[in-house]
């Protein structure tokens, strides 16, 4: 048997996420360790995350997965941006920021993703790059468990890490990926991607009209209330039919939402990722797809930016047939006839009716493909796989950084230059691109000098550009003439309570308090300094009592730093218990754009006391 090499330990001084402290392989002796070398832009890295979750669940006491984030793009080197990716992808294992590629070089890694398996004695067992990792690693881990268990060298002590999601407050929207406006019906469709649903607003007053999907991740057709999605992204709307087409990205499917019947139906994709190369065409419902990220409708043809297979596809809505339109499936930048061109993770698509314009993310380019299948693909602006940056200019001399969104309007293309935190404007005739909005810094500042945080989707209606400001969990609105930006204030937020899986209810047991037989109950909410209740949402307190009578529900509407309410209370027994359920919508003062949701459940025991005149309950939980 070939001697196993000792795995080099992690250097000191690196930043760690999803854990309270740095880890070392020395401290993990007795555990099987799986290193996942990844970068958060990479579609192949996203594809193996479900396999890693399966392995973590199956070997939860024997296996420790550690993500080694070795960045491709400049912006991916920053720990805060990696943290956002951890939250967006729901990663549940520790991640080390290898921003200088030190661990990458120590292990001789050459591609994303690469996985390295280390045995309980710290020796390297196996090394593999690419997708399709579950079966080989499952087999090897099972062998290591048997081998080291027999030798008494396997540590099955459970390990628990403090995850980033435990520190993230809930928001009404969660990493919205794409937006789509329709002037004919006065609607704005929002892909509330990490809440796994579509939110439909009225463009007249920004109020919630419809929510499509239960908010639970899954793939279930049916009525809007019970249908499920998994990370939906781009959308296309047919106003004549009242039908919304949705790129259900992590389900590898195209879904149809009929706004008349309020039903969701899968029209392409099987729910499984296609791994074949070249990918086959066929009947939509029988053909596996690969991470469709955006869609655009021309007549009865739905064109798809198929990020996972590095292609554009088309779905004939009359026949149900789906097939590649442009790109061979090889990841590269090659201008050529549609069938011979090479693309790299197309993630946004739009049209002027004659050409398909798309954001080709991994080559940081904006490209065009003829609608005619016999046409060509050409690059309008941008570089190549490792040519990126932030430079306005003409054609191939300009530089972008992983753009995700593009929309055609009035002869121009507006581009979400995602990793540069900017919106740019491109003239497809002259191929000149220039910064339109944004300074490049991360933030959520409104006004004439706005900031964004990895915007991912764009749409236009009534002279306004609507922006899915993904990492800010916001929709921003820019006036195309004045360039002034405002944050969209959504009305009817009570319809957008985060799904149960997305919001952690805080449980608090309060000490017994003295109470009068008949008097007043005062509830005080202590908000953090610099925050106030959101005036556009109805925060509320629901109070239930055992052994007492109390008016059960009150709205907390005053935008005060310390909102409070008073209710009459009467004890019917010597001891009583109050159950107080709080749902709080709150925002930063002076910066209302950053708004959050908090749910808390307080249990307050009471003891009758003739000297008391009031019962006071104070909530100062962690918001």
Image: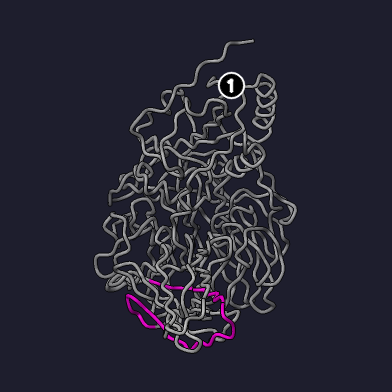
Numbered marks: total: 1
Indicate whether residue 397 is drawn in magenta. Answer: no
What residue would you read off at disc 1?
125
Asked whether 182 or 601 is in front, the reply is: 601
Residue 19: image location, x then y, percent: 45, 42
Asked whether 85 or 425 is in front, the reply is: 85
**Which residues lie in the magenta part?**
558-586
Asked whether 566 or 29 is in front, the reply is: 566
- Residue 340 is left or right of residue 321, and the answer is left
Is residue 97 something one can see in this rendering?
yes
Please identify the residue farthest to the front as the structure is shown.
610
Identified at 34% across, 54% down, the residue is: 431
Residue 63's place in the image compared with 175, above or below, is above
Classed neighbour count for the residue bearing mark 1: other residues with Cα under 10 Å, few (<14), some (14–19), many (≥20): some
Would you identify the image quadrant in which residue 523 lies?
Answer: bottom left
Residue 482's place in the image compared with 284, above or below, is below
Determine the main secondary structure of the stretch shown in magenta.
strand
Residue 299: image location, x then y, percent: 60, 68
């Amino acid at each position: 048997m070939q001697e196993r090499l000792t795995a080099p330990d992690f250097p000191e001084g690196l930043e760690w996420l999803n854990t309270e402290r740095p880890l070392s392989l020395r401290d993990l002796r007795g555990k099987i360790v799986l290193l996942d070398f990844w970068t958060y832009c990479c579609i192949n890295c996203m594809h193996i995350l479900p396999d890693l979750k399966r392995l973590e669940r199956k070997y939860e006491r024997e296996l420790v997965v550690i993500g080694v984030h070795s960045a491709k793009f400049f912006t991916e080197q920053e720990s805060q941006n990696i943290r956002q990716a951890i939250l967006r992808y729901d990663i549940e294992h520790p991640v080390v920021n290898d921003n200088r590629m030190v661990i990458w070089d120590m292990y001789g890694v050459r591609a994303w993703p690469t996985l390295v398996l280390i045995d309980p004695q710290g020796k390297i067992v196996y090394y593999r790059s690419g997708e399709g990792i579950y079966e080989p690693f499952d087999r090897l881990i099972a062998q290591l468990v048997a081998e080291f268990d027999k030798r008494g060298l396997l540590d099955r002590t459970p390990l628990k890490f403090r995850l980033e999601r435990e520190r993230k407050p809930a928001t009404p929207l969660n990493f919205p990926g794409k937006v789509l406006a329709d002037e004919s019906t006065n609607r704005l469709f929002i892909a509330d991607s990490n809440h796994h649903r579509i939110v439909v607003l009225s463009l007249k007053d920004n109020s919630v009209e419809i929510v499509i999907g239960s908010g639970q991740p899954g793939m279930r057709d049916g009525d809007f209330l019970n249908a499920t999605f998994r990370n939906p992204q781009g959308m296309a709307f047919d106003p004549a039919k009242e039908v919304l087409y949705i790129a259900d990205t992590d389900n590898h499917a195209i879904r149809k939402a009929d706004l008349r019947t309020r039903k969701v139906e899968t029209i392409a994709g099987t729910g499984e990722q296609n791994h074949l190369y070249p990918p086959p065409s066929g009947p939509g419902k029988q053909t596996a797809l690969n991470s469709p990220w955006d869609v655009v409708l021309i007549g009865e043809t739905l064109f798809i930016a198929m990020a996972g297979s590095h292609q554009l596809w088309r779905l004939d809505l009359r026949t149900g047939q789906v097939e590649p339109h442009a790109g061979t499936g090889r990841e590269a930048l090659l201008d050529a006839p549609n069938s011979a061109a090479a693309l790299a993770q197309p993630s946004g698509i739009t049209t002027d009716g004659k050409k398909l314009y798309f954001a080709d993310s991994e080559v940081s380019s904006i490209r065009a493909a003829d609608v005619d299948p016999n046409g060509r693909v050409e690059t309008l602006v941008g570089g190549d796989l490792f040519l990126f940056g932030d430079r306005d200019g003409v054609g191939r001399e300009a530089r972008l950084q992983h753009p995700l969104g593009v929309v055609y309007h009035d002869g121009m293309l507006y581009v979400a230059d995602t990793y540069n935190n900017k919106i740019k404007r491109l003239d497809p005739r002259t191929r000149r691109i220039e910064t339109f909005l944004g300074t490049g810094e991360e933030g959520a500042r409104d006004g004439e000098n706005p900031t964004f945080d990895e915007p991912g989707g764009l749409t236009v209606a009534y002279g306004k550009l609507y922006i899915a400001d993904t990492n800010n969990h916001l929709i921003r609105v820019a006036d195309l003439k004045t360039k002034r930006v405002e944050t969209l204030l959504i009305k009817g937020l009570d319809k957008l309570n985060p799904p149960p899986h997305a919001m952690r209810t805080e449980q608090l047991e309060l000490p017994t308090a003295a109470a009068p037989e008949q008097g007043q109950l005062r509830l005080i909410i202590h908000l953090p300094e610099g925050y106030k209740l959101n005036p556009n949402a109805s925060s509320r307190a629901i109070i239930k009592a055992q052994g007492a009578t109390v008016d059960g529900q009150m709205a907390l509407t005053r935008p005060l730093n310390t909102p409070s309410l008073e209710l009459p209370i009467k004890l019917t027994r010597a001891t009583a218990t109050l159950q107080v359920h709080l749902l709080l919508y709150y925002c930063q003062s002076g910066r209302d754009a950053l708004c959050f949701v908090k749910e808390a459940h307080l249990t307050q025991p009471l003891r009758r006391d003739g000297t008391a005149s009031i019962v006071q309950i104070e909530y100062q939980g962690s918001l």
